[in-house]
Amino acid sequence: MNKTEKKELAKKFYTIMYRTRRFEQEVFEFYKRGLMPGLAHLYLGEEAVATGVCEVLEDRDYIGSTHRGHGHLVARGADLNLMMAEILGKETGYSKGKGGSMHIMAPDKGILGANGIVGGGIPIATGAAYGSQVKGTNEVSIAFFGDSASNEGTFHESVNMAAAWNLPVVYVIENNLYGISVDIRRVTKEHRLSTRAIGYGIPGITVDGNDVFAVYEAAKKAVERARAGEGPSIIECLTYRWQGHHVGDPGTYRPQEEVEEWKNNEPIKKLEELNLLTTDEIQEIKNIVEMEVENACKFAEESPYPKEEEAFEDVFVK
Amino acid sequence: MQKMLYREAICQALDEEMARDKNVFIMGEDVGVIGGNFKCTAGLRDKYGDLRCKDTPIAEQGFIGMCVGAAITGLRPVPELMFGDFMLVCMDQIANQMAKITYMSGGKVHVPMTIRMPIGGGRSSAAQHSQTPIAMVANMPGMKVVMPSNGYEAKGLLKAAIRDNNPVIFMEHKMMYTTECEIPEEEYLIPIGKANVSREGTDITVVATSIMVGFALKAAEELVKDGISVEVIDLRSIVPWDKETVINSVKKTGKLLIIDEGHESFGISGEICLTVMQDTFYDMDVPVMRMGTKDVPLPFSPALEFPIIPDKKKIVAKIREMV
């Protein structure tokens, strides 16, 4: 990659990561003001993973997401207005208020859906890949999921079939070390989760999940391999969530030094330290993103709630 | 008319739909090379290739979930679960994913898949291979539940299920796969949600599903000599079910007997009884009765299994009690 290309990418990465960061911070604000029903699981601190991976994809590719899915959705180009409205339970949201934070689906963007069941989205993303094999097209499918989801049976079943049949799918493990309060190292023997790939006969790699370029490079290789019909790969991205499991979880089970260390090595700061962008360029990006996020908040707050009768619609389609 | 076995009628339905729409594909354990554990997919892999008639590893959560993913990206999967009991192995993908994705997406995302499975007891397959788990899927909004009563019904209903843009649970009775049926040469579909009055009568309404329809019809035949006129209604589908046809019948006969092979307690008979009773309470002569599998896990020994599942003899006795 030459300097110009790298700079262009840096601009894109910064934009998307900052957009995700600010969006999530505003979700938290809505929560604190009591305007957000239920809970949200924020992507703060993990922005580089979704950003780096999604930049590799074509419009026609698919992503499967998780309960911690806002980052994937923003990186894939989902509409911030529709996202925020959905998170607030408004009629104008992606699912007309029926799904909420954990079930946002945007088929026009290849977003198979955020998912409330840990590990539940892995077979679904794998199936989208199977479908593209049946169709004879070569869309690639990305399955995003966490370290703890990799202990669900759905991970094993999906990766095994994808490997056996060379499905065009990439498995991205977002290893943020915790499944709610449980440190993955207490419940798993082999901590380097990407080594599971060996058992399936496919490539596996572990990268610094807070280094957006490292994520991008690994994803590029894996997506190219998948698209060429050579089968799946596992990319383990080491990262960390700033907050607890959800907006109401103080996360006191994590040592303060650990949290501080990761916050000092957070993805946006690491990108700034590469000095690829000038202060002015960064400020310009921030100004634009602030407008977008402000508009999304305004749109969501001013949108109406759905009417009671709507609860009975959309169970079945024609 | 063609004479064939129930399982061949299923196979013909699949063949016709796969020929008609290249997005239809089959997936499941042993469905490909050997044409299915019960031979319902015989010859399809040779005709349509490996990708569209895929032998899977033993991984129900995995392959049913994969079918959900394929369905939401433009395909029309028709996976097979080798036994309906194995729904329990992959219940998350069925009930939390397949059935709820359309609603959770505000109607944006469609899941046009049909899961086929054999259900029912009667051949000493014991507790984990003989269940009729209708109630658990009927009770969860978001999926249609269809139970054909014979080979003719099976073909028409399966074609309709495959063309339906919603998830369908398609329950075939394993004891019926080798029964004979007559299939028209011309193409036909049977709409989901419309019950069939299999036999008209005036003294009692018998609502039945799946293999019980045949038993009820045989019982009705036997009762003719006693001067009892039995109306048999084949529900065909549990979700949605044809309340109107049943209500109209009970208004006529004043008596209702519900027969299905699910466990009696907390099963679909309670649901049917309550719904029908609300519109026919003052037309009823006797309390509603029901017959189902008794509330025990299905035992292995025929000496134990046969007494706990309804059959023609028990149905005749029950009707005599009521009329």
Image (spheres, coloured by chain):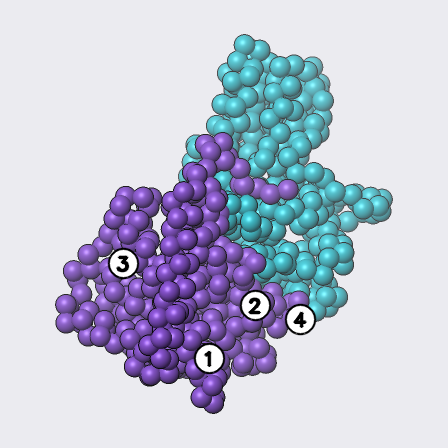
Q: Nearer the viewer, mark 2 or mark 4?
A: 2
Are both tags, 3 and 2, on one chain? yes
**Circle nearer the viewer, 3 or 2:** 2
Circle 2 sits in a helix, a strand or a loop, which is it?
loop
Looking at the image, is B228 positioned above or below residue B122?
A: above
Number of the label disc, if any, that sits on residue A245: 3
Q: Nearer the viewer, residue B142 or B309?
A: B142
Residue A53 in picture, x, y percent from top left: 45, 73
Query: What residue is disc 4 on?
Result: A136
Is residue B210 rendered to the left or right of residue A292? right
- Kindly identify the amino acid type of the residue bearing the numbered disc 2: Asp
Chain letter for the cyan colouring in the rendering: B
Nearest the viewer among A305 and B182 is: A305
Q: Name the residue type under label 3.
A: His
Residue at x-position 43% and y-position 39%: A304
Whether label 4 touches label 1, CB < 8 Å? no
Alpha-carbon span between mark 3 and mark 1: 34 Å
Decide which of B103, A46 is in the foreground and name it: A46
